[in-house]
Amino acid sequence: MSSSRTGRPPVQRAARPPVAPRPPRENPLRTLVPRARRAWDRPLTAYYVILGGSLLITVLGLVMVYSASQITALQMSLPGSYFFRKQLLAAVIGAVLLLVASRMPVKLHRALAYPILAGAVFLMALVQVPGIGVAVNGNQNWLALGGSFQLQPSEFGKLALVLWGADLLARKQDKRLLTQWKHMLVPLVPAAFMLLGLIMLGGDMGTAIILTAILFGLLWLAGAPTRLFAGVVAVAALLGAILIRTSENRMARLACLGATEPQTGPVDCWQAVHGIYALASGGIFGSGLGASLEKWGELPEAHTDFIFAVTGEELGLAGTLSVLALFAALGYAGIRVAGRTEDPFVRYAAGGVTTWITAQAVINIGAVLGLLPIAGVPLPLFSYGGSALLPTMFAIGLLIAFAREDPAARMALAMRQPRFGRKRIGGSQRPRRWNTMRRRAPGARSSGER
């Protein structure tokens, strides 16, 4: 054995254990879809998507109403924030209605179906009384409330048809009467045609289209046979064709589909073409908030029906895609609420509200893009107009209430506790425990970790 210079035997080092190979890192893109699915399957996802999505659309709509309406207000010798202040007041009242509707039990919603329908029919009939009804842009669908405030009762007719139709179909389903086509159509279709007739007396075909979409949505959710459903669609299409053919204004709007330049003559397509100009000049990120050129008298109804065009010009493709994504998330969450419930009234009402908001958004955006005729309907929660905003926010409160009624969501909400504050128990105040997801074993010592 060799020795070192000091005469001591050499120190033999222990052999190192073999290093275990590190497991390969998972690709985050591969786990993105499963994680998104797990997050979407949580009980409160629909609740948060509906609440957050609707509030984001409303807040962004307030910003765009302020930006798009300044020039119009100044041209009318009004303060620049005139339309914004009115919309803000409507949004505050609508937020109160949303909160009340979201806290109301389902039985109370069903009890309000008939009073809301009766009130909407009365107000819609009152519009046609000379001296009471007010005509705006050729459509007599408004009631003067005093000063500059006006009310459009046909907007509340949408909410009335959703609640009343859902309650009617739910009661018939409980009695197993929906298997007979007579009970499926009567009295739902005659009542819907009565509302449509009152709306068409004022010439507002855009609102009539939305009401027809709600009717089709309710029949589809009720399981109408294909022949029956096709028959109702054919009758509605025939009536719509007759109404369009007999009106020069509606024929002119139909002739503007796909127009890229203003024309001379009775059909000028000025509004449709300048809406395309606004979207085309926006680019990817837009010209900047408040920097629109089309709102300077070139684009009619810039803060109402064509506010999406101003959004595309000022916020660009990024802004318009964000609005579309919010509406898509809101619609998908509404479908989830309707599909996961066992209560037939909740299913029909949630499906009716989702059909209403989705169809109206598609018709408005399609008209701005030049893909559909200009129907004169506002973008839900986004365009200027308190008469449209109030019932829509109440309908959003309905969806929130229905999302809370899900058993899993109700249990998840019951487990949540406020983190701060004290609670009175028997007249004394006791400190609340921290609401953590971790459960400690009895008798275990605290480690000091948060």
Image (cartoon, rainbow, N blue to C red):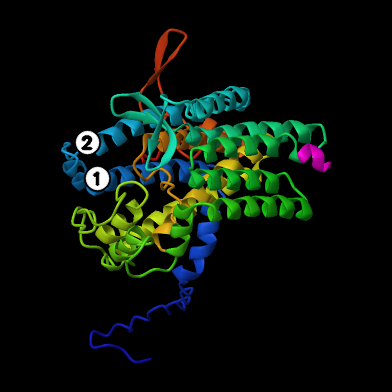
Instruction: Describe residue 296's horizontal placement relative to residue 30 as left or right.
Output: left
Magenta span of residues: 179-184
Using the image as rendered, state which of residue 245 and residue 324 is in the foreground.
245
Residue 31 drawn at (x, y percent): 50, 66
Using the image as rendered, state which of residue 93 and residue 214 is in the foreground.
214
Q: Write the residue at 83% across / 36% down.
A: 176
Residue 11 drawn at (x, y percent): 34, 80
Q: Main secondary structure of the magenta part?
A: helix
Circle 1 is placed at which residue position? 69
Label 1: few (<14), some (14–19) or many (≥20) C-alpha neighbours in 10 Å: many
Q: Write the residue at 20% across / 59% down.
A: 293
Callout count: 2
Q: Write the residue at 52% across / 51% down.
A: 359
Residue 41 drawn at (x, y percent): 57, 50
- Element type at mark 2: helix
Circle 2 is placed at which residue position? 82
Please tell me in which quadrant of the rendered image residue 424 appears.
Answer: top left
